[in-house]
Amino acid sequence: GAGVSQTPSNKVTEKGKYVELRCDPISGHTALYWYRQSLGQGPEFLIYFQGTGAADDSGLPNDRFFAVRPEGSVSTLKIQRTERGDSAVYLCASSPVRTQYFGPGTRLTVL
Amino acid sequence: AQTVTQSQPEMSVQEAETVTLSCTYDTSESDYYLFWYKQPPSRQMILVIRQEAYKQQNATENRFSVNFQKAAKSFSLKISDSQLGDAAMYFCAYNYGGSQGNLIFGKGTKLSVKP
C-alpha cells in the first residue's frame, strides 16, 4: 500500500514568510509525528498526534510553530514568521501501534 | 532524560564483508523499544530492525542483526554480506514503552561500502 507522503518535497521561502507543510499518513494509522532534522543531526521530535488531538507538543521550539490534524488523517505543520534557523528537513511519521513509518520529508530553506 | 549515543560518525566496509555499528543509550525505564533506521540520500527513513527490551533474544532481519545488551545499555547493529545499497546514514532510536510517544535518535553513523 501507499506509504507516508509529504508535500512539498522542497520549499524555499524568505525570512518572515508563513509556510505550511503537509503530511499524508498511511491509511488507518492513528498516531502521527513531526520531527525536524538539521544538517548532520538525527531527527528531533516536534509534536505527536493521537487521532485529532495533539498528545504531546513539547518539542515545538516556540509559538511560531503550530500543527493540526483536524480529521485524524492529514496533518499540516505551520510555521509563522520564518527565520533562517528554521531551515531543515521536516519529517513526518505515522504508526499503527509502536513502529513509526516515515515519509520522504520536506526540505525547508529560509533565505 | 533518555539519551542515545552513536560514537562512530563514519564507518567503512568492503562489499560482502561484515560491519558493526555501535549504539548506547541511557534510560531509567525497564520497558522500552529500540530501533535502527537507515536514511539514504533520498532522505526517507527506512526501518531496519526493532528490539523489544523485554525480549532476551536478539532481533534478526535477513542480513541485519542486533546485539542487545540490556545491562550495558548497548544496542549494536551487525550488517553481514554488505552490499553497495547498504551505504547510508544509520540512526539508532529509543522509544519509551509506557506510551506511544516520540523516538529519541542518535546523531547517526555514515556507512560507506567499497566495491
Image (cartoon, coloured by chain):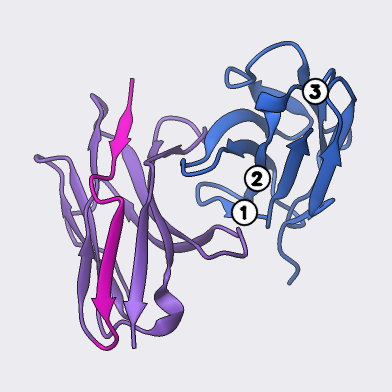
Chain colours: A blue, B purple
Q: Residue at x 46, y 40 (%)?
A: A41
The answer to whether B4 appears left or right of A10 in the picture is left
The amino acid sitting under disc 1 is Phe
Q: Residue B32's x, y, as percent?
A: 33, 38
Q: Decide which of A28, A36 is in the foreground and name it.
A: A36
Query: In whole angstroms, how far apart are the C-alphas of marks 1 and 3?
Result: 24 Å
Task: Say yes or no: labels 1 and 3 on the same chain.
Answer: yes
The amino acid sitting under disc 3 is Thr
> Which circle marks residue A82 in the picture?
3
The 10 Å Cα crowd at callout 1, few under 14, some 14 to 19, many 20 or more, is many
Q: Decide which of B107, B57 is in the foreground and name it.
A: B107
Whichever of labels 1 and 3 marks the residue nearer the N terminus, that label is 3
Q: Residue at x 20, y 78 (%)?
A: B18
Q: Is the Cβ of the residue at disc 1 closer than 8 Å to that at disc 2?
A: yes
Residue A74 visible to an observer of this rendering:
no
Q: Which residues are magenta?
A: B1-16
Indicate the chain on which mark 1 is placed.
A
The answer to whether B61 appears left or right of B85 in the picture is left
Indicate the chain on which mark 3 is placed.
A
Q: Decide which of B110, A96 is in the foreground and name it.
A: B110
Q: Residue A57's x, y, as percent?
A: 64, 20
